[in-house]
Image: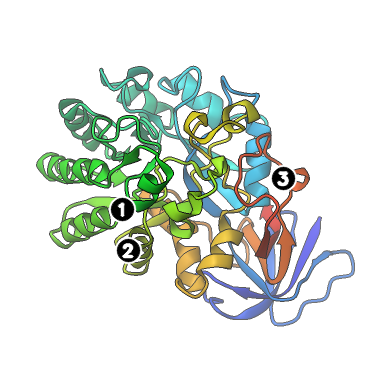
Amino acid sequence: MNILIKKATILHQSSEFHLSVKDILISDGIISQIQGEISHEDAKIISGNKLYCFIGLCDIGTHTGEPGNEHRETIDTLTKSALSGGYTALAVFPNNKPVTQTKADISFLANHSDRNGVSIYPIGALSKDSKGIDIAEYMDMKSGGAIAFSDGLKSVQDTGLLGRALQYASTIDVAIIHHPNDNYLGAGGEMHEGEMSTSLGMRGIPDIAELHMVQRDILLNAYQDSQIIEHAISSARSVEAIRQAKNEQNNIQATVAYMNLLFTDSDLYDFESNLKVSPVLRSEADKQHLIEGINDDTVSAIVSNHTPLDEESKNLEFPYATPGATGLETCLSACFTYLSEKIAFPTLLHKLTMAPRLLLNLEIPEIAVGVKADLCIFDAGVSWMCTKDKMASKSANNPFIGKELKGKVIATIIG
């Protein structure tokens, strides 16, 4: 099969074609030509109003649903959602049933028959059953292909346990991914603690609950001389603490969920349950500091925080709704729609494509003649309505359903 992409601006910093407008011919999954003008009678043509071509997006911390919660998401629907949103690689959290904590669990996900060409990189459990009590079997999981260890969005409260995790993981040169949140300081909280939580009569989660854990993790990481990724930070003070630590040569990295770059606690005025997420949406000042952190590279990557949930978990009064929203299909378009004046498009793409792979030491696809295609084709010149019937995910807990977004993924090509 031949695919011909017409007049696309190539965005790939290490490619000789970076920022140039080219035609790209893909033959049997291999990039065979990149030229100013290509003609091919038998090729399927991909064209648009304002096309960009870049490598497929990579997500860190995707929730798979399968195994255990197939009513929310299967590997088939997950990877179809990924392709719809331009993702070709997913580093998936271990919070399944059973928890991903053995070589067999790793192999089940990485080699699943319904991946639709998407690369799945399993993240092994940090603690046994992700309960935060005993350390898991890292060597076994690493030998099976685990690329990192984490308990997902479950924050490790036991400092000794996290210290041992960092120590053991460093001996096999694997990063710990940790979501910082003091469960005691934030106990019972439904949203960010501030003026909005007070006016809505909701119990809040203070930013110090995150900052406290970030500061602890910085100290532990320096002590163990290890690698830690603070996953999905949400507050201005966390950004500043990580910025200072990086300036002091601490090997700490950070990610941010895209919804924390787009929304604030003020958007919860009508108790929209699809905006109830973890981490919580914080203040306008916090959002602006997160954007600054992206621009000055304090925050290394943007993640979709894809958390599929069934209607019974979300179609409830706000205090009873489970936190989480799907994100794979809307992350890129939503960021392009709302952040284009705050984050340069090449920077945004770097945080969604190369940066996640660099954090996890994954191979970075090339855009060059003779290599396997791993491409996302994005039309910045179109707008589209996000509707439930057009989404590939089994779950519909997404705040953009019924809203118009600018820029659309029109093709994701993997080999």
Q: Residues within 10 Å of mark 2 (few under 14, many from 20)?
A: some
Q: In this rendering, is residue 394 above or below 191?
A: above
Horizontally, residue 324 falls left or right of residue 164, namely right
Q: Is residue 264 visible?
A: no
| Mark toward the start of the polypeptide (2 vs 3) | 2
Q: Earlier in the sequence, mark 2 or mark 1?
A: 1
Closest to the observer: 329 or 83?
A: 329
- Residue type at the position of mark 3: Met
Q: Say if 2 sits above or below 17 in the image.
A: above
Would you name the residue on which mark 2 appears?
A: 289
Q: CA distance from mark 2 to mark 3?
A: 32 Å
Relative vertical location of residue 399 with respect to residue 126 in this rendering, above or below: below
Disc 3 marks which residue? Answer: 391
Q: CA distance from mark 2 to mark 1?
A: 8 Å
- Report x, y in % for residue 54: 58, 65
Q: Earlier in the sequence, mark 1 or mark 3?
A: 1
Task: Say what amino acid the circle numbered 2 marks.
Answer: His
Marks 1 and 3 in Cβ contact (< 8 Å): no
Q: Secondary structure at mark 3?
A: loop
Tag 1: amino acid: Ser
355 versus 152 height, above or below: below
Residue under the point 57% across and 22% down: 67
Instruction: Give how far across and how far down residue 100 sits, in percent.
Output: 45, 23
Tag shown at residue 235 = 1
Residue occupying the point 34% across, 67% down: 292
* Residues at circles 2 and 1 in contact by the CB criterion of under 8 Å: yes
